Amino acid sequence: MKAIRRFSVRPVLPEPLRPLQELAFNLRWSWHPETRELLRSVAPDSWQAAREDPVRLLGTVSADRLAALAADRGFLRRLGVAIGDLRDYLTEPRWYQQADARAGGELPRCVAYFSPEFGITAALPQYSGGLGILAGDHLKAASDLGAPLIGVGLLYRHGYFRQSLSPDGWQQEHYPVIDPHELPLTPLTEPDGTPARVTLDLPVGRTLTARIWQVAVGRVPLLLLDSTVAENGPAERDVTDRLYGGGGEHRLLQEMLLGIGGMRAVRTYCRVTGHAEPEVCHMNEGHAGFLGPERIRELGEAGTGFDAALWSVRAGTVFTTHTPVPAGIDRFPEELVARHFGEGGELAGLGTEALLRLGRETTADGEPQFNMAVLGLRTAQRANGVSALHGNVSRGMFAGLWPGFDADEAPIGAVTNGVHAPTWTADAVLRARTEALGDAELWELRRTLREQLVHEVRARLRASWRQRGAGQAELGWVDDVLDPDVLTIGFARRVPSYKRLTLMLRDRERLTSLLLHPERPVQIVVAGKAHPADDGGKRLIQELVRFADDPAIRHRIVFLPDYGMAMARSLYAGCDVWLNNPLRPLEACGTSGMKAALNGCLNLSVRDGWWDEWFDPDFGWEIPTADGLAAAEPDRRDAIEAAALYTLLNEQVTPCFYDRGVNRGGLPIRWLEMVRATLDRLGPRVLADRMLREYVTGFYAPAAAAHRAMTPEAAGELAAYADRVRQEWPRVSVDHVEPGAESPTLGGTVSLRVRVSLGDLDPAAVEVQAVTGRVDGDDTLADPVYVQLKPEGGADLAGRWTFSGELSLHRPGPFGYTVRILPSHRLLAHRAELGLVALPGEEAAEAHGTLFR
């Protein structure tokens, strides 16, 4: 018999134990070993059954046990130390406060960080993969550094799916019901005690209401919106049912709630708590793109015109793209968007056409669509990819928004992702770093971590086979799966096709020979989830599972279902090598290898994402790629790169691990040198602290300064300037370039005089540039240098202006230059920002910009 209603009864803790509630409801415990150990000691025998979740644990502790703890002076002393440490952590000045003091108080007082998912701990299952884990690490790093962030997301009542396997290895999805009252959440309430709400208007007189839950992520509040409230109809209640569930209107409503509702939730939180209002809003991908139009609406209601409001919003907005392919971006039919933002819907005061222009792209078949990444770029003055290579890929992918500019000039920078070391580093490795470990001790540490992984793999594999229908008597072989003395390779991630889960199966004979090598065997642990709608990804999983089911090799290769944060931490610590073989350059960053590196695991990877910029032979191995074959011959490319992988494993990786001559004390000295280099030299680069500092100094601080400078008067001035320039730009041209005498020698100069037409624009409204540099055989400029030319006197009788300057010749060899005209205004952050450029000759006709069309 099933219950018709479910609720949770929370315990009433004895007065001396009340601080346990505070410790359990602040997720700092998830990355603070001492607090986690204290909470575990409340009921050690129940810790695993509670899934290492202290809120769940406290809900099961008996009254007798609580009474005993309340009388235990030793426990109370430890509790007092832990709660005092937490309160100090929450209040003491940290890096951000010190940096702000050095900057004279110029850093932003608050940054609102929007993401569709957050991976903070397995106890709060609101993530699916790398995007959410990155968002969680971003908040944790902000907390550790004292950065004043407010996180904003949605609370999914079914989270992402739990994964199991059918008897034939097909992925099965399960969606457990998540009760907010069993999670480390507290409701945000109004001063009168009623739950705080946000409401969105929907077509046909409907509304979408959501309550606001708070999560304490150390010092950072995370606001999660939940549409499962009585005020909603059935369809509206289901808006926050599943992470990335549904499509079309359902996905649009999720993104409206995240962007518009999320911005309103931030305003409510600041009003209720007195927290500083955000000066900067950061969109983690385009899913939250509607926060820009919502902020335009706010300014419009205060009397600011649309164009001026757009410039004001752009000044204080940062957009991060994680997508290396156009197909990964959310798009909606314009008719669907218009229906939800037209009369009777949301943001109706903006005008439907004005809103559609912000996200419009024209597809190959000529049909306009509403593109959420384009919306993000058009409403954010600062944008970035998540590795140096991905920044370059993104500039090429979105270059069409800035026609006439080279792709390298597209205003999209890069901040390489980082990972939160206290979350992803095994406690044993954290402790060991404070000691001077010798080679033998380091090798023993790595073996201990590998052995722990072996035991966990066996337990998980046994549970998986039981779910697949095997009886206990059939599973004796599981006790021999993996060997704590064998080189262990990890491969765990989402399973879209470009990550190539089954590349290792390309030549099964070669793989089998590596697994069963008599002197230098390898063993492989694989995990990952395919999207529920991705049958292609599910087929890849099934192919690998069926291979791993073979009795001849199943002790050397395993697939573990239900990959998540709890499993990942063990994999990163226990594996010797982390394998990553995506189609280059489709891995935006790929942080799993970073987490493995923090534990002394070496990387074996294609030069994609972060590995492209930080690869070093001391940190691991580069899998050669055949990039030029990607589109035309994908099958041949896979064959070439799989062969390179087998060769690396056979000729470099396994010999390095097993090279333990007697004169080496039975230790793989070169391997241990690489482990030390990974820990000591690579580890500091991959940290989320480094990433957060780069966001603060390179994006948040400039955005806050621009936000403060963009007063209503300044925004109106810039909007008027941009409108005037766009109207006059068809009359702007480079008419004649007159070089001086040319006898170029190294260290010399070349003089230029240029006549230009500016329409009714003044020379102060533009910048005339000479672009110079070495040229290739096609006269393409390489590593260009930009030289501003100066006006000479007034306009001639034909209304043309003359600009001049000198070009320095610093390098020998072929040299070239061109001339162009750009808009120039003190409030523009980038020379390509308006998407307008005038070039000599025929090129000029193609360079009239699409960014604000």
Image: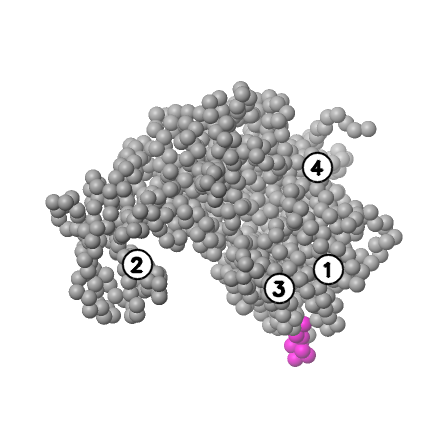
Quadrant of image for the C terminus: top left
Image quadrant where residue 824 sits: top left
In three-dimensional space, the C-alpha distance between marks 4 and 1, rounded to whole angstroms, equals: 29 Å
Name the kind of residue labelled 3 in the image.
Answer: Ala
Callout 4–callout 1 Cβ contact below 8 Å? no
Residue corresponding to mark 4: 176
Callout 4 secondary element = loop
Q: Is 659 inside the magenta-drawn segment?
A: yes
Residue corresponding to mark 3: 639
Q: Position of residue 148 (x, y in %)?
A: 46, 40
Mark 3 Cα-neighbour bin, 10 Å: few <14, some 14–19, many ≥20: some
Mark 1 Cα-neighbour bin, 10 Å: few <14, some 14–19, many ≥20: many
Q: Position of residue 395 (x, y in %)?
A: 43, 51
- Name which residue lies at 60% across and 72% down: 670
Mark 2 Cα-neighbour bin, 10 Å: few <14, some 14–19, many ≥20: some
Above-or-below relation of 800 to 612: above
Of labels 4 and 2, the one closer to you = 2
State which region is magenta.
Answer: 656-665
